Amino acid sequence: MVKVLVIGEHDGKVLNQATLKCVTSAKGLPEAEITIALLGADTGAVAVQAAAVQGVHKVLRVDRPENAHVLAATYAPQIAALAADYTHVFGPSTSFGKDLTPRVAALLGVPQVSDLMAVEGAYRFRRPIYAGNAIITVEADAARKLVATVRVASFEAAPASGGSAAIETRSLSVALPAHTRYIGAKSGSTDRPDLQTASKVVSGGRALGSAENFKMLFSLADKIGAAVGASRAAVDAGYAANEMQVGQTGKIISPEIYFAIGISGAIQHLTGIKDARTIVAINKDAEAPIFEVADFGLVGDLFQIVPELQRLL
Amino acid sequence: MQKIMVCIKRVVDYNVRVRVKPDGGGVMLDGVKMSVNPFDEIALEEALRIKERLGNVEIVAVSIGIADTQQQLRTALAMGADRAILVQTDTAVEPLTAARTFLSLAKKENPDLIFLGKQAIDDDANQTGQMLAALWDRPQATYASKLEINGDKATVTREVDAGLETIEIDLPAVVTADLRLNEPRYVKLPDIMKAKKKPLDTVSLDSLGVNAGSLLKTVKTEPPSQRQKGILVKDVSELVDLLKKKGLL
C-alpha cells in the first residue's frame, strides 16, 4: 500500500498553499493514503487546517520548542523517524522543502526526485532538467522509500475544506543537533499576495531602469490585487528584492495572469512562468523572445503603457 | 580556518541551448561547450575571498566525472584554488552518490568548510550539499547570500522564499552558494599558466569504495510542451478589452 508523508509547510499560524499542492500530487499515486506531518512549537491551529484538507487521512503533530524555527538540521532527523511508517515522503519545491527534503533522503539513504511535475505511477514520475529545456521520466526502485519535492506550479491546490483527518500528536525520541541556530529573518513582507501562490502577478525587468521606476509596478499591482515579481536582471541591478526573482533559480510560479513588463524573456526566466495560464508581454523590442510565449503582446514604451493600463483597469 | 573544500561540477555551459535527442535517449551533448557550474564558481569565489581575508587557508577544489573534468578543475586552480582532486568515473553520478563521494573526501581532508553551488544547472536537482551535510552529520547553510566567519562559527544569510534568513552554524559545515553571494573573478592568462603547475590528483570512484550505480532510472527524455504564440494587440485599450472578455481582470 502506498502511504505518503507530506511535510507540511506553515508559519505557525497558517498552512502554506504549497502543502495543498503536494497533497494533490500525492493523490495521483495509486491508492495513496496521505498523512501531513507538522513540526513546530505549537502546531495546534495549523493541524486543524491540515485536517480539513480534502483527501488527507491523518495529521501528525510534532510539537517541541526546538521546532519553533525551521532548521533542516533539526527537522530532518524527525521527518526521517516519522518516515518509518511510510513508502513516500513528499515536500514542496519551496525554499523550505528544497532545503529540508534532501537532508531527509540522505538520512534514509535513498535518492530524491526533485521538482516532480507529473505522477505516472507509484514509482514513476516526470521532472524538468536543464531549466525546463528537457523533461525526463524517472523510475525508482519500489523496494526503497521514495523522497520527492513537488513542483508546486504543476499542481492545483487540494480543497482546503471538506476533509476530516484524525489529528495525532507524536513525541519522538530523536536527539537533535545544537550546531545550527536560528538568528532572525528579514522579510519583504507586504500586504500584497504571496508571489508563489498569487493568481495575478505583475513582473518587471531591466527596462524599468531604476528602483524608483519599479514603484509604478507596485502601484499597478495594488490596483488589481497582484503580487510583484522581477527578472534576474532587475534583481541584479538592484531594482527589486531578491525574493521577487522569478525563473530557474528564483521562484517557479503558475498564476492565472502574468504581466511581463520590460522583460526580454531569457530561457531562465521563461522556465519560471511557463505554467502561467495567460502571459501578457509589454516590451519596446518587437523581437524580444517573451513575445514567442505571450498570449497577448503589446510592443511599445512601458513608461507610457503602464500608467495608461492603470487608468483603464 | 585551515582548509576549505569546494565541490565543482562540469556542466553544459550556461549559454548553450540544450536540445533533446530525437530518439528520446537524453540530450545532445556532442561538441557542446562545457564549463564549471556557475553556482560552483560563486562557491569557489567565496572560498578565495575567505582565504584573502584570513590568510593561510588551503583551498582544495574537488570534482567527480570523466577525465576531461580536469579542464574545469584547471579553471578552479587558475581562479586561485591551491590544489585539486578529480574522482574519475565514466558513469554520471546522482546527487546521493556525489554526496557519498564528497563525504569520503571530507573524511580524508578534514576541511573546516565545504562549499558547493546551490544547484547544478544540468539536472537542477538542488540536493548534493544538503545530502552531504546529512551524511557528514554537520550543519548546512543553503542558498547563502552572505557569509561571515567568526572563529569556529559562521553567520550565514540565506535567500528564502519570504526574504532573507540568518542562521549561525558551528564549523565544520556545508554551505551552498546562491547567485548573489558574490561575483566570481575573471581568470587572467598568467593565472592559467600558473595553474598548470598546481597539483591535480586523480583517484577512481571505486578506490573510494563508493558504488556508482544509479538509483533512479531515466526511462525517457522529451522536449517540453511549447506554449502557443499568442497575438499582438495594437494598444492598451484593446489589451484591457481582451483581458476583461477572458474574465482575467
Image (cartoon, rainbow, N blue to C red):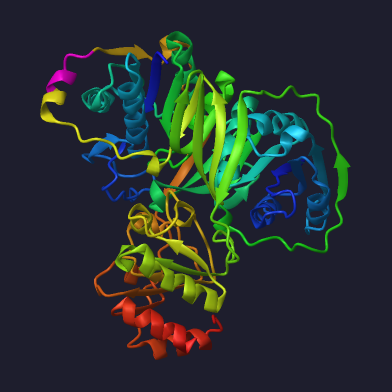
Q: From the viewer's perspective, is residue A63 above or below residue B2?
A: below
Residue at 54% x, 74% y: name it.
A222
Q: State the residue in front, B240 or B163.
A: B163
Q: Position of residue B81 (x, y in %)?
A: 28, 21
Q: Position of residue B237 (x, y in %)?
A: 41, 90
Q: State the residue in front, B137 or B120.
A: B137
**Image: magenta residue range:** B193-198
Residue B207 occupies quadrant: top left
The answer to whether A218 appears left or right of B37 in the picture is right
Residue A170 among those drawn in magenta: no
Residue at 40% x, 64% y: name it.
B226
The answer to whether A283 appears left or right of B214 in the picture is left
Residue B65 visible in image: no
The answer to whether A99 appears left or right of A10 in the picture is left
Q: State the residue in front, A169 or A139.
A: A169
Residue A110 occupies quadrant: top right
Q: Position of residue B236 (x, y in %)?
A: 38, 87
* Quarter containing the N terminus of chain B: top left
| Total count of labels | 0
